[in-house]
Image (cartoon, helix red, strand yellow):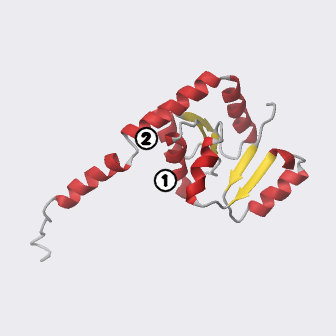
Amino acid sequence: IPQIRLMLVGDGGISGDLTQQAKTSEIDELVDFEGWQPSSRVKSYIEASSVCVIPHIRSEQTDNSSPNKLFQYMYCRKPVISSNCTSLEKIINGEKCGLIFKDKDAEDLAEKIIFLYKNPDQMSRLGLNGYNAVMEKYNWEATVRPLVEIYGKPVLKFPILGI
């Protein structure tokens, strides 16, 4: 893909390893290591991207959680390419807002990136689907209302237990 760039935003224990790996692989000129950024700047990085990737390695934790960045990407109308963590796969496939690759499979990830590069209409469609899902389903109003209703109900007493 001509003029492809990988932008890594954030910091963590493997940042040094990734920087070294990029140099060793002689692709460091294609990778921008942005480091930790304040939340006020995160949206500008997402907006500057064509595709957003969540390359989590599957684990009990990643199979049962969804990072906030997924919904930020969706809100910004970006197609998401994610590893096949159960929770992410369910949302992305269910909302038709991105593609799934097998965790730790660089070739599968590359195929998904190339597919979207060659299919800009699909990129737009996936991005719009994600945005619509956030506006209708994955937002504060839609997720908090059921909790408020639950907490607004009278507390049940359990006379047998004496509480």
Label 1: element kind: loop
Q: Residues within 10 Å of mark 1 (few under 14, many from 20)?
A: few
Q: Which residue type carries mark 2?
A: Val
Where is residue 158 drawn, in percent x and y?
A: 13, 69
Residue 122: tell me if it is visible.
yes
Of the 4 image quadrants, the one containing the C terminus is: bottom left
Give the residue drawn at x 79%, y 31%: 1
- Left/right placement of residue 9 relative to residue 98 reads right
Of all residues, the one furthest to the bottom in this rendering is 162
Give the residue drawn at x 78%, y 56%: 18
Name above or below for residue 141 compared with residue 113: below
Name above or below for residue 160 compared with residue 50: below
Image quadrant assignment for residue 51 = top right
**Residue holding disc 2:** 134
Q: Which residue type carries mark 1?
A: Asn
- Left/right placement of residue 133 relative to residue 89 reads left
Q: Residues within 10 Å of mark 2 (few under 14, many from 20)?
A: many
Mark before the other along the chain sequence, 1 or 2:
1
Where is residue 8 drawn, in percent x and y?
A: 71, 51
Where is residue 110 drawn, in percent x and y?
A: 73, 36
Q: CA distance from mark 1 to mark 2?
A: 19 Å
Residue 86: tell me if it is visible.
no
Give the residue drawn at x 79%, y 63%: 16
Per the rendering, the mark at residue 64 is: 1
